[in-house]
Amino acid sequence: MHSASSMSLPAGGVRPRRPQFVSRLSPHLTGRDHGIYSRAELRAAERTDLDIRRAVRRGQLLPVARGWLATPSAHLGAVRALRAGSRLTCVDATSIHGIWTPGRPADERLHVYRRRPRGDHERWALPHPPWLGTWPEPDPVASLHLSLAHAIRCQTPETASILLESALHERRMAPLEVEQLLEEAPLRLSRRIGMLSTASESGSETRVVRWLRHAGFAVEQQVYVEGIGYIDAYASGVFIEVDGRGHHSSPSAFEVDRQRDLAMRRLGLQLVRVSYPQVWYSWETTRTALREVIRNVGRQGRGAVARLGGGRYT
């Protein structure tokens, strides 16, 4: 796997250690995450059958399927799947797990898996084979491992890469776990996904860096520039910052970015900032523009990097 770059400018400067987090989160969701509870789960929380019946009469719990109840605010997709004898999985499950998941059309069918085929699913659900004799896990929503295994087989290589790299970034899975998922997948799919990175901090960054590498550029991720901080990516003389979905949610965040941009220019470094809409709503135009930027100012940028002692990266 690709990892964060050791590139620092000026060369030989003190590079601060980035904090390392070890997730203690379970790969399995609970009722607190999606609002669906089994009777056994409620009884384990010391809710008697009388308590449950009272909660149902008051509208605090709603019967969904045999042995399952949901709160009024429960995840609608998970409830719909469970009522139809299915379980939510793939990108519909990864989003509940807190994994960076690309936006999807509102009318896209729900991704589910189930024990046997049912014709009434075809209008609103996208079933994931194979049909099962027994449930592989008791959860009403697929675990992170199972939802990612389904996504590898269902989604485009780019989307699968985004999900897997997000799981790495969020410390929800270790690199060895991700590698095992890819080894268990059909070889033709794992080859199309290719090399992953442990350094991507958003799905937008995965998309940009993945394209740069496929376009033949050597990419350094999370490059440290003294007095400025970490920059998302560097490719052939150009530094690239990739803004996320909620970027510039406050005036102070906008001001910090302007200060970083000015500091980079003072060093002679070439910085390009791409926004979330540029990455996701006008990606073809953005790719063309990035190629032209690298072609037009990359030489100047490589010269500035060399002057700062980063010659081996030029």
Image (tube, rainbow, N blue to C red):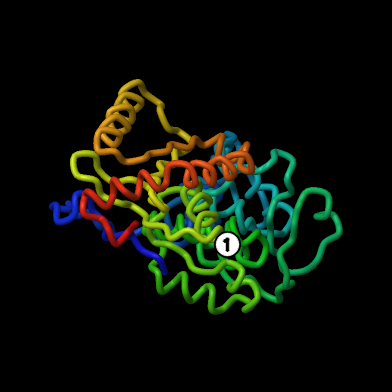
Q: Nearer the viewer, residue 282 or 170?
A: 282
Q: Identify the residue at image location x=69%, y=40%.
A: 105
234 over 132 or under it: above or below = above
Residue 126 at least partly seen: yes
Q: Position of residue 47 (x, y in %)?
A: 46, 50
Work out which quarter of the rendered image holds the C terminus and state it: bottom left
Q: Quadrant of residue 267?
A: top left
Q: How many marks?
A: 1
Residue found farthest to the top: 251
Q: Position of residue 309 (x, y in %)?
A: 21, 54
Q: Nearer the viewer, residue 232 or 110?
A: 232
Q: Is residue 39 left or right of residue 303?
A: right
Residue found farthest to the right: 119
Work out which quarter of the rendered image holds the N terminus and state it: bottom left
Give, as a three-letter code, the residue at label 1: Ser
Q: Quadrant of residue 75?
A: top right
Residue 74 at least partly seen: no
Q: Position of residue 228 (x, y in %)?
A: 24, 39
Q: Secondary structure at mark 1?
A: helix
260 over 8 or under it: above or below = above
Q: Position of residue 44 (x, y in %)?
A: 43, 58
Q: Is residue 269 left or right of residue 180?
A: left
User: According to the image, label 1 marks what residue?
Assistant: 147
Q: Identify the residue at image location x=57%, y=62%.
A: 147
Q: Identify the residue at image location x=48%, y=76%.
A: 180
Q: Identify the residue at image location x=28%, y=28%.
A: 259
Q: Nearer the viewer, residue 90 or 160?
A: 160
Q: Residues within 10 Å of mark 1 (few under 14, many from 20)?
A: many
